Image (cartoon, helix red, strand yellow):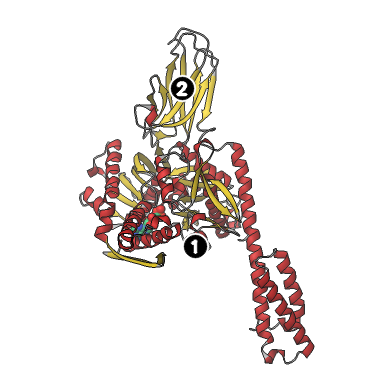
Amino acid sequence: MKLVTCCATNWGNKAPAIGIDLGTTYSCIAVWQNNRVEIIANDQGNRTTPSCVAFTANERLVGDAAKNQTDMNPTNTVFAIKRLIGRRFSDASVQSDIRQWPFKVVAGPNDRPKIVVSYRGEEKQFYAEEISSMILVKIKEVAEAYLDCTVKNAVITVPAYFNDSQRRSTKDAGDIAGLSVMRIMDEPTAAAVAYGFDKISKNTKGKNVLIFDLGGGTFDVALMSIRHGKFEVKATAGDTHLGGEDFDDRLVDHCVREFKSKYKKDLTENVRALRRLRTACERAKKTMSFSTQATIEVDYLYDGIDFSTRISQARFEELNIDLFARCIDLIEKCLSDAKIEKSRVDTVVLVGGSTRIPKVQQLLHDFFEGKELCKGINPDEAVAYGAAVQAAKLNGQGDREVQELVFVDVTPLSLGVETRGGRMTVVVPRNTPIPAKNQYVLTTVKDNQTRMPLAIYEGERAETTYNNLLGKFVLLGIDPAPKNVTKIDVCFEINADGILNVSAQDRSNGHKNKIRINNKEGRLGAEDIQKMMKDSEKYKAEDEEFRRRHDAWNSLEKYSYQMRSILRDNNITKMLSFSTKVNIEDAIGKTISWVEQNPLPQACESELKMNELKSICKPIDKEVNKK
Ligand code: AMP
């Protein structure tokens, strides 16, 4: 990777800001350039990069390189990290994922999941934020190589249904990666921009657009109103745990059952076999989007058995029908929250790789009574596209049309405070437009009460035990008074990233306390982030060092064989004296055995050997370029 420190002239003094779709399975990067959005291809030429990080005995791999070696190294290849970020280890969904994953996850401090891998012969543990940051560092490098400029500012998208802790953790991952996260943007809003941006000037009447985003790990639905460049979310619904990976799981389970009944063997005991089967199942699933059947075939799957089975599209649909139906239920919930009849939806926009599944499209078509589905935008790139437009706007780039865009997101879950009897008292109802600031007045419940503990929750249940605890704090210094007299103003403030701050103030004496939610428990502290930023630099330096060693070693080997082939060409060497020839031959032979006996030496050792060999081979070296 080229080291870039200064900006190319076409950016003037302002560094560009990028839009990042940090997906469960794939991530995508885009930038506003030449008055339009450009999708940035990675070093492999791919327009999306697998959200995958692998650790080996020698190196750390990110993206395509990591995904391509998954089958060989399943326990140290980490994927679907978006399903862990901002969650607790004891969450039911985390527990069910862990059972499926070949890599190990353990409970860390404060019930936070930690991923355990073997890296360079040592056991290492990482938080989800650190793994995500490794993907983001890769993305940053890809963007920098493309733009020939240092990139810092970025907009990162998250599912609209991500809660406070998931949003904060995503932002932390960006900080660790050395990015300055200008905004955490909702994925449906970003997708709506991809759909509606070029129609703004023509669209005077306004449109109700339903964004249906079914990706690898998450499902998001949003009802948006687009009018005169204002993209307003009316309501959102979704499931942070519903997507292509679940459909793959169903196919894997199906094959495991078939294998058991045919061969009386349990595939689930073998992590590598499961991983290879999963890859084959995902391939078959994709085939079935264009064909009525597919073959799932894996040689030497388990105990030397070659596994092969045919699956029909109809059987695939049957295996997943409850999951597909759940998507439709969530659309109904979203429409009812937005108080809009389905007949008033003008367009249904399909986003996310899993919307290619014909049954999903058919169910949508039926639900909307024949309405055309908009497949005109690239489902893999739409979210990054919208993020790039938002990034340009926040960065003061782009034309007037970009600068005049307005995005209005909403809170995905109700936010509230616990009151007497474990009751959830909602302060900010779900689907409130953000940024938002709402107040609620509490009073003391005992005579002479001088302190008031507050517990902040998110969720829709009436009892707080069933909702998600975001944080607790205590307001001290309340002046003694009879109960119900002292008034405490509790203020919930949600910023444009959807992140919440809560404060409480005694009205009579002005004493105040506030918390940034989850500072201590579910979330990383500033010190943790600093440490992880340092680690991230360290890992990057280690990767670069490994590549240097590898390259130097490889070049030495290549050069030695090249010289040997030249030496064996009589036409070239007939001019040399016998002793020179023997001398060169001997030096080449020794270098080749050194290369074989010293896998991956220090780069400087290979470089030294290279210099030695080059000086001996000088008489024939000039022939290299002619060969
Ligand atoms: P995304 O997160 O939007 O990149 O979506 C990735 C998911 O889409 C993965 O689970 C893929 O297996 C799935 N996917 C991609 N192409 C297809 C296809 N042709 N048919 C079914 N699923 C697909």
Q: Are marks 1 and 2 in contact (CB under 8 Å)?
A: no
Please state which amino acid type lies under the numbered disc 2. Answer: Val
- Image position of 494 with respect to 268: above or below: above
Q: Is residue 83 found left or right of 224 in the rendered image?
A: right
Residue 102 coordinates in the image, percent (x, y): 46, 53
Looking at this rendering, what residue extends furthest in the top direction?
482
Figure quadrant of the N terminus: bottom right
Q: Is residue 290 found left or right of 406 in the rendered image?
A: left
Residue 41 visible in rendering: no
* The quarter of the picture showing ligand 1: bottom left
Question: From the viewer's perspective, is the residue at label 1 or at label 2 nearer?
Answer: 1
**Label 1 element class:** helix
Please state which amino acid type lies under the numbered disc 1. Answer: Met
How far apart are the alpha carbons under marks 1 and 2? 54 Å
Please give the label number shown on residue 490.
2
Q: Is residue 364 found left or right of 408 in the rendered image?
A: left
Q: Earlier in the sequence, mark 1 or mark 2?
A: 1
Q: Residue at 74% of width from left, 71% of height from top?
A: 609
Q: What residue sits right under mark 1 in the picture?
A: 72
